[in-house]
Image (cartoon, rainbow, N blue to C red):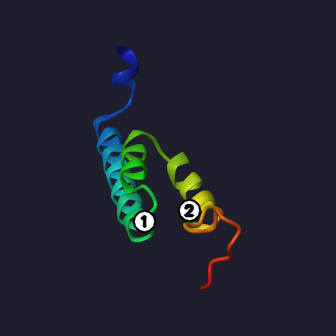
Amino acid sequence: MEELNAMPLWGWIVLGCVLTAQSTWLFIDARKRESMPWFWGIWGLIQTPMPLVFYFVFVRSGWFRKGTGNGKREKR
């Protein structure tokens, strides 16, 4: 229980704000890209910064695009 007291109250408030902002941004951006917004939003609430890193690698970079699973290339 003493580990919780080692971090000051302002640190917990900042951490909560960072997690909420990260989760909100991930959810909104994933919804625009139709890429599992609930998954990214919930994962963004749990930890930081790994959800952002994975989101940029897998969703924003285009590794997994919708409609490319049958060998057809997607036109931009």
For label 2, the SS is helix
Q: Residues within 10 Å of mark 1 (few under 14, many from 20)?
A: few
- Work out which quarter of the rendered image holds the C terminus and state it: bottom right
* Residue 65 spot, x, y in % from top left: 59, 66
* Residue 34 spot, x, y in % from top left: 42, 65
The label shown at residue 4 is none
Q: Which residue is mark 1?
A: 34
Residue 33 to residue 9: above or below:
below
- Give the CA separation, mark 1 to mark 2: 10 Å
Q: Residue at x 63, y 78 (%)?
A: 74
**Circle 2: residue type:** Val
**Image position of 43 (left or right of 54):** left
The furthest residue to the front: 70
Q: Residue at x 33, y 23 (%)?
A: 5
**Circle 1: residue type:** Glu
Q: Residues within 10 Å of mark 2 (few under 14, many from 20)?
A: some
Residue 33 to residue 27: above or below:
below
The furthest residue to the top: 1
- Work out which quarter of the rendered image holds the N terminus and state it: top left
Number of disc labels:
2
- First-in-chain label (1 vs 2): 1
Residue 9 to residue 64: above or below:
above
* Residue 69 spot, x, y in % from top left: 64, 62
The label shown at residue 59 is 2
* Residue 46 spot, x, y in % from top left: 40, 39
For label 1, the SS is loop
Q: Residue at x 68, y 76 (%)?
A: 73
Q: Nearer the viewer, mark 1 or mark 2?
A: 1
Where is residue 66, by image quadrant? bottom right
Q: Residue at x 36, y 59 (%)?
A: 27
